[in-house]
Image (tube, coloured by chain):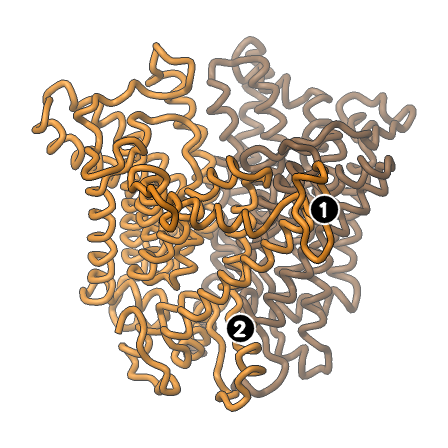
């Protein structure tokens, strides 16, 4: 791929787009994914069998699954039904917040790499490695401390260990890309399989809890786990962790937008040749971006261990893959990641509610995730519709395909042409 | 800017060719070393490995494991040669693996099911093609979306239809045994195999022929290397890319259908029964330098490793099962580290605008 041409192309297209448009496209993608999901639920409801009483009827046709109920459970049920009486934050709502917290970190991990022009599909593996390292590190250190002091020292220590090991694991595909030009999409996918296999071996053999049939480490002592505040104790959620996540959203935003490292990362992401010409060490930027991305994935793993399950267990849920969706939906903007993570946190929380309340297979949410990515990837489709609806709109507007957030950069860094009067947006 | 590009391209060009030879040498040399060591010390681990390497069972299961990967790799070659990076091969394999079983289950005909799997894969490839060619979506992101959609849709459908992510068992295509030839030691495995194995050989040969000896193949290559020239010559670039992506749907669909039908079941837990084969296919054709025959041999290398790890797990040579299972993935990374600088088609990954409205 002639990277220079491609980057120039991307840059030219993105200058014309705007942050508002990105937000509109993300929302439209979500709506469209729900619409397709509705059709899918109806079709699936015709393919399965159920009794006449349990079916719902639309236009005099009976369906076994009710899309209205499904999406009601998926969104409102996920938040513990805030519009019904007796809502408590300590129920399903905490689960949505817990998932949001983890997705903030995996989303930031993917976004960080994306901004440097890297597709890090390996957040899942980095999270697994960071999680196991955090568990083992905390277990090693926990006999030396106890009580509140133990919590104050051990929780940050666990997160640090997770970040370091996740970062080191992230450096592998970074080095391979920087010095061997190995395609990071493939290496990171392979490293995911390897992380899964190696950690499964470790927790089924070397570090296995002798008192449990499951493939897991010994449970962490209570004082080494994230403390719940205000609410969330029943659902393994800590408000501290969410706040930490929100702080990281702004921190990464600051690093990317207002530091020289962030400038190197962004320019390498947009136009690697120009960045190198301007004195950016491309290889170093790739490796350090990958390391930072992996570290964020590792923190997600550490939080999963110290906040959610209190030990490391083989078979970590696919937060890393959801992070890809979160980042793409957010246009790779760290602040946008916050909103996208909230949406997917709700979806993940809703998955279990849907499973309880309906017969619809929970894999539906996986399909929705794929559809959202597909639609976000094709902004031209929405522009086409937009042009049909608003014929007076500028026809020469070009295409943005990925990384909508880069729009803001290109405007900021190139003083490019105005975006047609459409301004405003999350980073304005 | 453009001069800079050309130099980079030439740099990659040279790098690609010079770094491939040592990798092949290392792989072949390593195998030979194990082989010789095993012959001299039959009691050692190398001896066991040699036994496994030379057993007819290993070749036969390596061939069986090759089918989905090789067919998907052929599909990937056509798409990428035409300028569309199809990272969604994994998704095409998943959707065809499930549909093949489903159609076989309801019609009772194995080959009807096979055709059903191919149709499903082609439809998903068509969606991908429309999104990428018509709506200029980023090829990598759209490819990931195809994978994720199939990864959710196949177990979803299985759950709706069968009430669980795994399908019931259906008939398999069985095996075709050629008399006399199948009695040859070791290579007899070539003549006592599932029809899908023969289909794979046919597809490899045909793909090579189409790509290198026909006008269509020349157009496909031009569409990926220099779409503008093709356009100037009066050939519709979009149409060639559509054809190539749909062809990748046909080939990957055959691979996915073969995968599930040879076992007579679809398993949809976790990463499903496809379990990364689509991604290994991508590595296989990169390693094979976009040559169908080269892709086949690198597939056979990965599949051979996979076949060996199954035997190794059974024999238990000291390495734990979970670690043996990751050997093929580690191999992929090592291979990529040596031949990472593959010379990919110049225009791959880029949208091509037929009109002159863009620039």
**In percent of the image, x 34 and y 47: which residue is there?**
A100
Colour chosen for chain A: orange
Mark 1, Cα crowd under 10 Å, few <14 / some 14-19 / many 20+, is some
Furthest-left residue in this view: A149
- Mark seen at residue A46: 1
Query: Which label sits in the foreground, 2 or 1?
Result: 1
Q: Earlier in the sequence, mark 2 or mark 1?
A: 1
Give the residue at mark 2: A382
Direction from residue A266 to residue B28 in the image, left or right = right
Quadrant in the picture for the C terminus of chain A = bottom left
State the count of labels. 2
* CB-based contact (under 8 Å), mark 2 and mark 1: no
Q: Position of residue B117 (x, y in %)?
A: 75, 45
In-front residue for pair B2/A191: A191
Give the numbered dot on residue B120: none
Task: Judge whether residue A182 can be spotted in this image.
Answer: no
- Rendered location of residue B177, percent (x, y): 87, 27
């Amino acid at each position: 791929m002639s990277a220079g041409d491609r980057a120039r192309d991307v840059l030219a297209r993105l200058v014309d787009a705007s942050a508002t448009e990105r937000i509109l496209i993300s929302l439209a993608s979500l709506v469209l994914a729900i619409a397709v999901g509705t059709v899918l639920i109806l079709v699936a409801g015709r393919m399965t069998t159920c009794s006449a009483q349990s079916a719902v009827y639309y236009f005099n046709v009976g369906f076994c699954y009710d899309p209205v109920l499904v999406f009601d459970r998926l969104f409102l049920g996920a938040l513990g039904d805030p519009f019904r009486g007796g809502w408590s934050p300590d129920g399903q709502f905490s689960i949505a917040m817990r998932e949001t917290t983890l997705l903030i970190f995996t989303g930031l991990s993917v976004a960080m790499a994306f901004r440097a022009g890297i597709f890090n599909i390996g957040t899942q593996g980095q999270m697994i490695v960071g999680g196991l390292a955090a568990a083992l590190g905390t277990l090693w250190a926990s006999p030396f401390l106890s009580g509140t002091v133990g919590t104050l020292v051990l929780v940050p220590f666990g997160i640090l260990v997770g970040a370091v090991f996740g970062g080191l694991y992230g450096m592998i595909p970074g080095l391979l890309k920087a010095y061997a030009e190995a395609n990071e999409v493939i290496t990171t996918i392979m490293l995911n399989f390897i992380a899964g296999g190696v950690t499964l071996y470790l927790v089924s053999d070397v570090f296995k809890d002798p008192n449990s049939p499951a493939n897991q480490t010994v449970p962490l002592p209570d004082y080494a786990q994230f403390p719940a505040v205000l609410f969330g104790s029943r659902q393994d959620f800590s408000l501290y962790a969410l706040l930490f996540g929100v702080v990281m959203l702004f921190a990464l935003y600051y690093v990317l937008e207002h530091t020289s490292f962030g400038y190197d990362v962004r320019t390498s992401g947009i136009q690697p040749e120009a960045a190198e010409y301007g004195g950016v060490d491309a290889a170093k930027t790739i490796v350090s971006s990958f390391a930072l991305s992996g570290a964020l994935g590792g923190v997600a793993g550490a939080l999963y261990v110290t906040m959610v399950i209190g030990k490391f267990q083989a078979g970590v849920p696919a937060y890393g893959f959801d992070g890809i969706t979160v980042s793409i939906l957010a246009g790779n903007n760290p602040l946008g990641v916050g909103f996208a993570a909230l949406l997917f946190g709700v979806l993940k929380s809703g998955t279990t509610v849907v499973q309880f309340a309906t017969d619809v297979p929970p894999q539906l949410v996986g399909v929705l995730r794929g559809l959202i990515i597909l639609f976000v990837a094709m902004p031209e489709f929405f522009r086409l519709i937009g042009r049909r609806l608003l014929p007076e709109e500028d026809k020469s507007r070009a295409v943005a395909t990925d990384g909508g957030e880069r729009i803001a950069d290109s405007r900021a860094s190139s003083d490019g042409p105005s975006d047609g009067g459409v301004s405003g947006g999350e980073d304005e | 800017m453009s001069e800079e590009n050309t130099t980079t391209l030439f740099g990659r060009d040279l790098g690609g060719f010079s770094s491939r030879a040592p990798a092949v040498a290392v792989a072949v040399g390593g195998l030979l070393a194990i082989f010789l060591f095993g012959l001299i010390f039959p009691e050692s681990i190398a001896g066991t490995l040699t036994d496994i390497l030379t057993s007819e069972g290993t070749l036969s299961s390596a061939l069986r494991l090759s089918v989905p990967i090789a067919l998907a790799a052929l599909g990937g070659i056509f798409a990428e040669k035409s300028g569309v990076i199809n990272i969604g091969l994994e998704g095409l394999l998943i959707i065809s693996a499930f549909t093949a079983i489903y159609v076989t289950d309801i019609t009772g005909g194995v080959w009807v099911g096979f055709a059903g799997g191919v149709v499903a894969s082609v439809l998903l490839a068509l969606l991908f093609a429309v999104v990428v060619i018509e709506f200029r979506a980023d090829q990598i992101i759209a490819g990931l979306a195809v994978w994720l959609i199939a990864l959710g849709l196949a177990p979803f459908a299985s759950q709706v239809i069968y009430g669980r992510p795994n399908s019931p068992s259906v008939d398999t295509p069985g095996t075709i045994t050629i008399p006399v030839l199948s009695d040859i030691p070791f290579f007899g495995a070539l003549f006592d195999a599932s029809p899908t194995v023969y289909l794979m050989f046919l597809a490899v040969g045909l793909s090579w022929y189409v790509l290198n000896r026909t006008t269509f193949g020349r157009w496909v290559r031009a569409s990926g290397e220099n779409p503008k020239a093709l356009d100037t010559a009066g050939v519709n670039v979009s149409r060639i890319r559509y054809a190539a992506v749909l062809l990748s749907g046909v080939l990957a669909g055959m691979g996915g259908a073969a995968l599930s039908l040879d076992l007579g079941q679809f398993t949809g837990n976790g990463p499903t029964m496809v379990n990364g084969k689509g991604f290994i296919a991508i590595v296989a054709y990169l390693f094979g330098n976009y040559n169908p025959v080269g892709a086949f041999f690198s597939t056979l290398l990965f599949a051979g490793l996979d076949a060996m790890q199954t035997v190794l797990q059974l024999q238990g040579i000291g390495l734990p099962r979970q670690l043996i299972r990751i050997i093929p993935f580690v191999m992929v990374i090592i291979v990529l580290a040596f031949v990472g600088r593959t010379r990919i088609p110049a225009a791959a990954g880029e949208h091509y605008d037929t009109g002159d409205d863009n620039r």
